[in-house]
Image: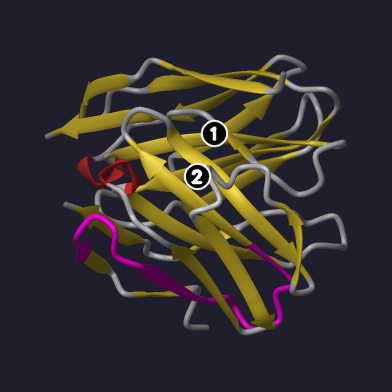
Amino acid sequence: DAGVIQSPRHEVTEMGQEVTLRCKPISGHNSLFWYRQTMMRGLELLIYFNNNVPIDDSGMPEDRFSAKMPNASFSTLKIQPSEPRDSAVYFCASSLMGLGRHEQYFGPGTRLTVT
Amino acid sequence: EDQVTQSPEALRLQEGESSSLNCSYTVSGLRGLFWYRQDPGKGPEFLFTLYSAGEEKEKERLKATLTKKESFLHITAPKPEDSATYLCAVQAKQAGTALIFGKGTTLSVSS
């Protein structure tokens, strides 16, 4: 199993530019999660999808952030326009909900730097 | 408000020196408590899930336990390769599938 795949691994962009992060969940998993990790705030949930439908986006910081899941094998997190305070590591995780199992499996992350 | 607090923030051990990491939580109905390991520059790696007070799980030198208010991750005779940040997370019954993470304990084991 390839695990959760994220791209790019590193992204450096200038303030005001659009940034798109991509995620391919583990095949067969039905839930997908986007997290952001910073030294100050730790790991924070931004949004999660169940069967491709957004369930809870209360963690999305502002309207500049948007996420989509057009099919079971692909999701994007977009920031437009980007700001220096968006610099962080963004993780995607997937899970197979049901049968009493709830563990989430994380990708390697995308380190975003906004200058 | 659901909350997770981990202590200590950092822990330095000599190889073979056993110790425990603490995860205290407040949650409105616990569905599960999760332990993850995170190496620098990598995503969190799943270790254990605990569902009810009194439950224990073991993997190599690690053992996780759960009470109604906290969980412990016991590390027996650690090796340098156990050096990592250990994250604790809880899932509340009324919060869907979202996990709330603590800020982690960074463990350093020297030989």
Instruction: Tell me which label, 2 or 1, sits earlier in the chain.
Output: 2
Asked if labels 2 and 1 share a chain, the reply is: yes
Q: Mark 1 sits on what residue?
A: B88
Q: Name the residue at 22% across, 54% down.
A: A113
Of residues B2 and A71, which is closer to you in this image?
Answer: A71
Q: Label 2: few (<14), some or many (≥20) within 10 Å? A: many
Q: Name the residue at 48% across, 27% down.
A: B74
Residue B88 horizontal/vertical position (percent): 54, 33
Q: For the residues labelled 2 and 1, say whether their Cβ atoms are less than 8 Å apart.
A: yes
Res B91 → quadrant: top right
Query: Label 1: chain?
Result: B
Residue A57 horizontal/vertical position (percent): 68, 50
Query: Label 2: chain?
Result: B
* Quadrant in which the C terminus of chain B is drawn: top left
Residue B59 horizontal/vertical position (percent): 52, 47
The amino acid at mark 1 is Cys
Q: Name the residue at 63% across, 53% down.
A: A47
Find numbered disc 2 in the image and state the secondary structure of the residue it sits on.
strand
The amino acid at mark 2 is Tyr
Find numbered disc 1 in the image and state the secondary structure of the residue it sits on.
strand
Of residues A49 and B18, which is closer to you in this image?
Answer: A49
**CA distance separating discs 2 and 1:** 6 Å
Q: Which residues are magenta?
A: A12-32
* Quadrant in which the N terminus of chain B is drawn: top right
Residue A106 horizontal/vertical position (percent): 50, 61
Extreme residue toward the left, this view: B111
Q: Mark 2 sits on what residue?
A: B36
Residue B73 vertical placement versus B48 (above, below): above
